[in-house]
Image: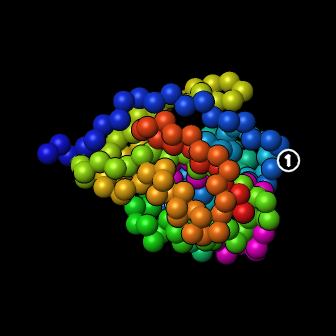
Amino acid sequence: MKKVYDVPTQHILLPAIQQNEVVIDIGAGSEALVSRITDAKVCAVDISMNKIREAWIYQSRADWLLCDAQQLGLRNAQFSLACLWFSLGYMPQEKTKLGVFEEIHRVLREGGLVSILSARIKCQEPKLYFRVRYEFPKSGVSTMGYLVRGGQNQTLERVCLMLTTCGFEIVKTQDKYHYFWITASK
Ligand SMILES: C[S@@+](CC[C@H](N)C(=O)[O-])C[C@H]1O[C@@H](n2cnc3c(N)ncnc32)[C@H](O)[C@@H]1O
């Protein structure tokens, strides 16, 4: 069996994030996509100091928080939007994903939204390599790749089920086969 399931380069147009949002970006390290494309206030969370340092080269204006997103150590109900853009795949255990969703539910305001952009990880290979070319909402492009653990059964349906289990309501989904978008609300 092949060791890596290779996803052909996907072209993803990132949505604009309005300036009046108060955003928590989960697993923001390495590329800091969210805080690079918006002037909104962003709390950028990552469990790895190395990944946070990598992201600093972009000089985004985010407030950085080094912690496990399952225990944010932030007060309840203060964010209007939580983003998980290509970070769920770096939490291969379902228990971790659920722990993160529960914690996001706690720190989101009533009616707050979760935006999930994720690879579909259903392959049997031990690794999946996802290639992507992002187009930023105002201008600019960026090409990168994500290497994640295979066999996670991370599908649109499965993640929707986890979100509803944690008290979210699904607002919108977009299935792009190799990846998906989910918007859910508290
Ligand atoms: C590939 S990066 C995601 C890309 C990033 N969202 C961006 O804007 O490009 C995934 C990140 O999730 C982080 N991560 C994994 N588990 C985490 C957890 N439990 N809490 C917080 N961050 C986590 C990893 O350290 C890694 O930096």
- Quarter of the image with the N terminus in it: top left
Residue 158 in the image: state x and y as whole percent: 46, 58
Residue 75 in the image: state x and y as whole percent: 76, 74
Please indicate whether residue 21 sits to the left or right of residue 58 in the image. Answer: right
Residue drawn at (42%, 38%) of the image: 178
Reply yes or no: does residue 83 show up in magenta.
Answer: yes
Under circle 1, the secondary element is loop
In this view, the residue farthest toward the right is: 20
Residue 176 in the image: state x and y as whole percent: 49, 36
The one nearer the camera, 21 or 33, is 21
In the image, the segment drawn in magenta is 72-87
Please indicate whether residue 18 sits to the left or right of residue 167 in the image. Answer: right
Q: Is residue 170 above or below residue 136?
A: below
Q: Check disc 1 and report the residue beneath it.
A: 20
Reply yes or no: does residue 130 show up in magenta.
Answer: no
Would you say residue 114 is visible in this rendering? no
Q: How is the image coloured?
A: rainbow
Q: Is residue 72 above or below residue 148?
A: below
Quadrant position of residue 31 = top right
